[in-house]
């Protein structure tokens, strides 16, 4: 069975601080995808990134960066110079790509990020 | 983006009444899912479908049923709503069967309150 753990339930920072959201996953599959989603107060789920299990390159997109390490089963997300608009709930999720998985996503519990001005 | 709409967006219903939520997609994606979101639990899978009339249970399926009579529609039914089913429900489609940058698309959610 697969599992995703986001140990940080809530994080509070002041604007311009850097913040890292942790994500640890468990799976027996060798082929899988990892996702990060943002859920702003409006409630929709906003896709941020997808990474497959064969691609351990870190990625940077503007102020966002992701560190994928298979050795520690972690897929951490860093926001540099945080802004108030980054306040949201962030979800890490795992999708096993095996033939019988039917593409089901397993989510972490979510991390509530609050950025204060 | 794959078109996916959920209806209704909000609903208040009484305990014991049946409720049906609808998910509609405008593309022919094979896989569709219903999740519920509750504080402290993230999103949990209720039911999923891997084709017309092909459905299966997810992690939290008790009290729910689904139907998929055509590719574009996936219905979630609460046969007799209970207060524990007060939640936000998300429908999703899996676009990983195509080469896209996305992989997974969610509807806007349905906020259901059972009183």
Image: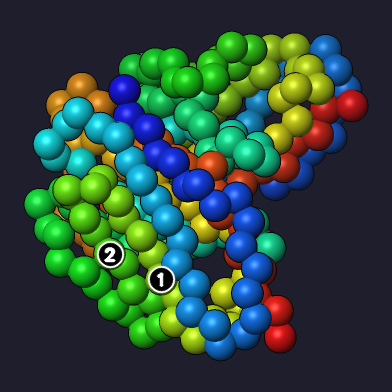
Image x and y of residue A53, in percent: 16, 48
Whether residue B4 is visible, yes or no, is no
Where residue A56 appears, x then y in whole percent? 14, 60
Q: Could you say which disc has been placed on residue A78 in the image?
A: 1
**Which residue is nearer to you in this view: A72 or B30?**
A72
Which quadrant would the C terminus of chain A be assigned to in this image?
bottom right
Q: Are marks 1 and 2 on the same chain?
A: yes
Is residue B76 rendered to the left or right of residue B56?
right
**Front-most of A80 and A86?**
A80
Q: Is residue A50 above or below residue B63?
A: below
Mark found first going from the N terminus, 1 or 2: 2
Disc 1 secondary structure class = strand
- Percent position (x, y) of residue A58? 21, 69
Which residue occupies the extreme front position in the image?
Answer: A72
Badge 2 local density, few (<14 within 10 Å), some, or many (20+)?
some
Query: What residue sits right under mark 2 in the picture?
Result: A67
Image quarter of the N terminus of chain A: top left
Please tell me whether mark 2 sits on a helix, a strand or a loop.
strand
CA gap between label 1 and label 2 equals: 8 Å
Tell whether label 2 touches label 1 (CB within 8 Å).
yes
Residue at x 51% of width, y 24% of height: B46
Left or right: A88 as drawn, with respect to B49:
right
Task: Locate residue A49, reporting x and y percent.
Answer: 33, 63
Report whether residue B82 is seen.
yes
């Amino acid at each position: 069975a697969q599992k995703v753990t986001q140990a940080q339930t809530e994080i509070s920072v002041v604007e311009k601080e850097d913040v890292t959201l942790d994500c640890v996953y468990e799976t027996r599959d060798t082929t899988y995808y990892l996702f990060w989603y943002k859920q702003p107060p409006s409630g929709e789920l906003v896709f941020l990134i997808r990474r497959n299990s064969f691609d351990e390159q870190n990625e940077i997109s503007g102020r966002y960066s992701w560190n994928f390490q298979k050795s520690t089963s972690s897929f951490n997300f860093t926001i540099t110079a945080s802004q108030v608009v980054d306040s949201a709930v962030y979800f890490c999720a795992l999708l096993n790509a095996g033939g019988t998985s039917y593409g089901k996503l397993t989510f972490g519990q979510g991390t509530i990020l609050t950025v204060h001005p | 983006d794959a078109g996916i709409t959920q209806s209704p967006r909000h609903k208040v219903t009484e305990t014991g009444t049946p409720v049906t939520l609808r998910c509609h997609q405008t593309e022919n994606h094979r896989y569709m899912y219903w999740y519920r979101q509750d504080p402290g639990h993230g999103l949990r899978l209720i039911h999923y479908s891997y084709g017309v009339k092909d459905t299966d249970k997810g992690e939290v399926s008790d009290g729910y049923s689904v139907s998929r009579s055509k590719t574009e529609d996936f219905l979630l039914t609460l046969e007799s709503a209970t207060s524990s089913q007060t939640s936000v429900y998300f429908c999703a489609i899996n676009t990983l069967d195509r080469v896209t940058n996305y992989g997974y698309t969610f509807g806007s959610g349905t906020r259901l309150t059972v009183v």
